Image (cartoon, rainbow, N blue to C red):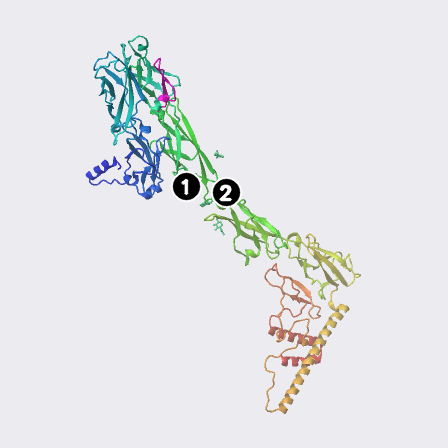
């Protein structure tokens, strides 16, 4: 059925052997009978245009009617078939035009493509011939001769061609025959011809039936009654001044405007010469548009005229005299176009949003402009507001693509109102505009950004675990989850401790909490990285460094290194008698594990034997004489020194400094007693030890001999492995002895440099270097060590044994005790 202009093209292709015609952008035309019901398949437009079904749906194929007229057809995207959507009545669409064409467009997107579809609506014989009136009245003179002709108005059939009126049949009668002739504009003249003279006396009136037949199969017919009255007077038919009346009229002419005046004259006198006018055959649209004054013959505008609907009106006007004789004439009214239609904008396939990362040139929609005026009145220019990153790209006539010209950024502008303005070229120009509201859809293109480049958190040591120390904050301008920020600590280690053991972060709020209590003396500062991540897919993240600074608190009391703060200190400073004023006699050495003010120590003498004799340097701790020492000054001078830090509140420690004003230790009886006391005590222990060992040894020998003597079969004794030394045999305050006979090594853990008085007469000053060479670690507690231990550090059992030996010998010689010398041999054997 498709009557293709395309087929000719294809024929040409075949003739040219090898021309690829796939995707030919052509126009198609179909013919379709009028009055077909909805869904009637006109043809397969997909096949005819070489478009497959997938392409049709992918490219959103659709049928557009031209202008805002009715859309008579639909395309079925599943099959590519063009079908009837709206019943087409040829008569109302095209009136009496011989060819009735409905134009449509097939629009495809991406890229925009347009195919014109021409639909020839074919006539079917669905209308019968119709006479203007049911009854035609004729008044004919008796005197009329044979051959006289009387005009009748023709019947009309809305159908065209063969389906229009083809034939007239007059009912058989005695007087008249029918003469049908065609005139030059294709119309038919229908006349009654008098075949046999009328006789008024015989028949005053007669009625005839005229039937009009169309050429359809089967034919349809219409009839009119012709009522003839026989008159006995003379009469003339009216005559119009023009054969055709023409007028032009602007389409916007107001109601009441006189268009033209028709006029006919009748040579008769009186009522026979009075002509009245009426439209003979007009379509209802013409009847609505114009009225004819039956007396004056004036045609006036009575309805709205529209050049776009109907540009030319062709009407017939009948002039009739009083007795019913009539003539007709043609009136042609041409309308001229006035720019009375504003351009119309149709937005098609419009996306309501576009992703912000769409590349420039992305099509947002199609703009179609239409103006029903013709000529320059219908020429439309289309523009959009200039301050937006969009433009209109002209496509096919009256179609534009709305495309982006730049990258969009939702974070800057999230919504555009694009004004599309269409204006025609008429004078004055008419224009209309439409606003395209376009939302920019988000893409996760912004990583979270911290408000600060870095953060620092200050924590005072001894904080409560769980306390908040700092808040980090990052913003992400993206939309919803693309802009929702979550915080996390970057897992790392701070001096071997996982960060998570130190700090935690609230993922939503960015508040950082201390997981535990910090100790400034152990950890002064560290850095952690906080990562802010959005919830987009894929997520974006950024990080920031948080420096955590632990602030010191005065939580450490000063530690006095010299002299040993408490206990039976035997450290005594010798002050020569000859010392003058302001001489340095001793120094108190103290440290404080805190820092800054909390470790800034000051020294004060809180109590002195002779308050006027010594002073102490407030910050140096140096003890000086205030004046020359005189003979009157007591030999023993004790100072109680308080060491205080500068913290809030301050912490302090005290120590006692023993000073001896003497040139020779031996001169001091009390001291001699004291040392002898100590010495004899030591000797006593030693004696007890040696006696015990000797006794044990002798007992052991006796038992051994006894066992050997008694049981000769078992000569060897039980004591095989290591021999334990009961701890009781060694002075408990010098070294601990464990069960396996190993002396536990005793280490000095801190660092000082001082002359220590041991209290031993033979070694008045013993220089002890018992400090590590490394610096004092902040975390090491000051352990009380045996600084008064005359043996110094013992690192292993062997050296301790040697030390004990030395000690024994030393003590023995010192006390000149022969028993002791004897005992040494026991010990030597024992060892
Ligand atoms: C666009 O128009 C809409 C509706 O008229 C309005 O609500 C919106 O605020 C406008 N947006 C801009 C960016 O002008
Ligand atoms: C987030 O961004 C992605 C692309 O990165 C996008 O597909 C998604 O629609 C965005 N989500 C929202 C809520 O806008
Ligand atoms: C932190 O950010 C920098 C650059 O912004 C990046 O090179 C580094 O890998 C990030 N660190 C972490 C732990 O994500």
Left or right: residue 37 versus residue 621 is: left
Residue picked out by circle 2: 477
Quick one: label 2, few (<14), some, or many (20+) residues within 10 Å?
Answer: some
**Label 1 near ligand 2 (CB < 8 Å):** no
Q: Residue furthest top?
A: 269
The residue lying at 39 percent from left, 28 percent from top is 343
Query: Is residue 680 found left or right of 73 in the rendered image?
Result: right
List the residue tagged with mark 1. Answer: 358
Check disc 1: other Cα within 10 Å, few if <14, some if 14-19, many if 20+: some
Kindly identify the residue that appears in the image at 65 percent across and 86 percent down: 701
Residue segment shown in magenta:
287-307
Does label 2 or label 1 sit earlier along the sequence? Answer: 1
Q: Can residue 536 be seen in this view?
A: yes
Up/down of 31 relative to 678, above or below: above
Q: Does residue 305 show up magenta in the picture?
A: yes
Residue 331 place in picture, x, y as percent: 31, 18
Task: Classify residue 59 by image quadrant.
Answer: top left
Give SS at disc 2: loop
**Disc 2/disc 1 C-alpha distance (Å):** 18 Å
Residue positioned most to the right = 632
Where residue 96 appears, x then y in whole percent?
A: 29, 26
């Amino acid at each position: 059925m498709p009557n293709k202009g395309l087929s000719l093209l294809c024929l040409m292709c075949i003739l040219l052997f090898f021309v690829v015609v796939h995707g030919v952008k052509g126009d198609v035309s179909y013919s379709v009978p009028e009055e077909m019901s909805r869904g009637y398949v006109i043809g397969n437009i997909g096949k005819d245009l070489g478009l497959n079904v997938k392409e049709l749906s992918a490219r959103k194929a659709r049928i557009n009617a031209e202008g805002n007229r009715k859309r008579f057809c639909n395309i079925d995207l599943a099959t590519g078939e063009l079908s009837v959507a709206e019943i087409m009545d040829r008569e109302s669409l095209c009136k009496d035009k011989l060819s009735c064409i409905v134009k449509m467009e097939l629009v495809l997107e991406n890229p925009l493509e347009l195919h014109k579809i021409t639909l020839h609506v074919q006539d079917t014989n669905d209308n019968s011939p119709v006479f203007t009136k049911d009854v035609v009245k004729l008044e004919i003179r008796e005197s009329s001769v044979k051959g006289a002709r009387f005009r009748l108005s023709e019947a009309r059939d809305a159908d065209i061609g063969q389906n229009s009126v083809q034939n007239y049949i007059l009912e058989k009668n005695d007087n008249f025959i029918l003469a049908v002739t065609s005139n030059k504009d294709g119309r038919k003249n229908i006349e009654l011809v008098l075949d046999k003279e009328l006789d008024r006396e015989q028949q005053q009136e007669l009625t005839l039936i005229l039937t009009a037949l169309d050429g359809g199969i089967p034919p349809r017919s219409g009839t009119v009654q012709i009522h003839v009255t026989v008159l006995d007077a003379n009469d003339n038919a009216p005559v119009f001044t023009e054969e055709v009346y023409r007028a032009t009229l602007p389409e916007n002419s107001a109601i009441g405007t006189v268009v033209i005046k028709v006029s006919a004259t009748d040579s008769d006198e009186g009522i026979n010469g009075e002509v009245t006018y009426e439209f003979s055959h007009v379509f209802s649209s013409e009847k609505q548009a114009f009225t004819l004054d039956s007396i004056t013959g004036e045609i006036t505008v009575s309805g709205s005229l529209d050049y776009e609907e109907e540009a030319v009106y062709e009407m017939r006007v009948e002039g009739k005299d009083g007795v019913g004789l009539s003539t007709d004439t043609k009136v042609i009214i041409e309308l001229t176009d006035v720019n009375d239609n504003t351009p119309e904008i149709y937005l098609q396939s419009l996306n309501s949003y576009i992703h912000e990362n769409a590349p420039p040139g992305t099509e947002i929609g199609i703009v179609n402009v239409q103006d029903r005026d013709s000529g320059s009145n219908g020429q439309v220019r289309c523009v959009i507001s200039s301050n937006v990153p969009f433009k209109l790209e002209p496509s096919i006539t009256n179609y534009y693509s709305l495309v982006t010209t730049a990258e969009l950024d939702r974070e800057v502008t999230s919504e555009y109102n694009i004004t599309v303005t269409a204006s025609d070229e008429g004078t004055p120009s008419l224009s209309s505009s439409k606003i395209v509201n376009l939302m920019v859809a988000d893409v996760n293109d912004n990583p979270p950004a911290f408000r600060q480049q870095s953060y620092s958190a200050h924590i005072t040591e001894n904080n409560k675990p769980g306390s908040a120390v700092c808040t980090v904050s990052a913003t992400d301008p993206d939309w919803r989850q693309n802009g929702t920020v979550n915080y996390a600590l970057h897992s790392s280690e701070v001096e071997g401790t996982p960060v998570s053991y130190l700090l935690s972060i609230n993922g939503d709020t960015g508040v950082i909490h201390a997981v535990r209590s910090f100790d400034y003396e152990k950890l002064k500062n560290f850095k952690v990285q906080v990562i802010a991540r959005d919830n987009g897919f894929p997520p974006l993240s950024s990080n920031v460094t948080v420096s955590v600074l632990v602030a010191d608190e005065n939580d450490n009391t000063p530690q006095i290194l010299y002299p040993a703060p408490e206990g039976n200190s035997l450290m005594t400073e010798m002050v020569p008698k000859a010392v003058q004023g302001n001489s340095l006699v001793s120094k108190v050495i103290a440290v404080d594990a805190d820092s800054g003010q909390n470790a800034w120590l000051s020294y004060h003498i809180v109590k002195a034997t002779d308050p006027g004799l010594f002073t102490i340097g407030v910050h140096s701790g140096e003890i000086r004489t205030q004046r020359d020492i005189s003979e009157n000054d007591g030999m023993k001078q004790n100072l109680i020194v308080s060491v205080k830090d500068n913290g809030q509140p301050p912490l302090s420690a005290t120590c006692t400094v023993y000073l001896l004003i003497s040139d020779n230790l031996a001169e001091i009886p009390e001291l001699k007693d004291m040392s002898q006391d100590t010495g004899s005590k030591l000797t006593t222990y030693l004696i007890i030890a040696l006696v015990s060992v000797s006794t044990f040894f002798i007992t052991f020998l006796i038992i051994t001999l006894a066992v050997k003597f008694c049981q000769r079969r078992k000569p060897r004794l039980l004591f095989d492995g290591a021999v334990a030394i009961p701890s009781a045999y060694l002075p408990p305050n010098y070294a601990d002895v464990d069960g396996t006979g190993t002396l536990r090594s005793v280490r000095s853990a801190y660092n000082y440099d001082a002359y220590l008085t041991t209290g031993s007469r033979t070694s008045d000053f013993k220089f002890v270097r018992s400090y590590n060479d490394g610096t004092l670690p902040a975390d090491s507690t000051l352990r009380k060590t045996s600084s008064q231990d005359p043996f110094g550090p013992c690192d292993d059992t062997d050296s301790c044994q040697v030390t004990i030996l030395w000690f024994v010998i030393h003590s023995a010689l010192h006390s000149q005790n022969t028993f002791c010398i004897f005992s040494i041999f026991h010990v030597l054997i024992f060892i």
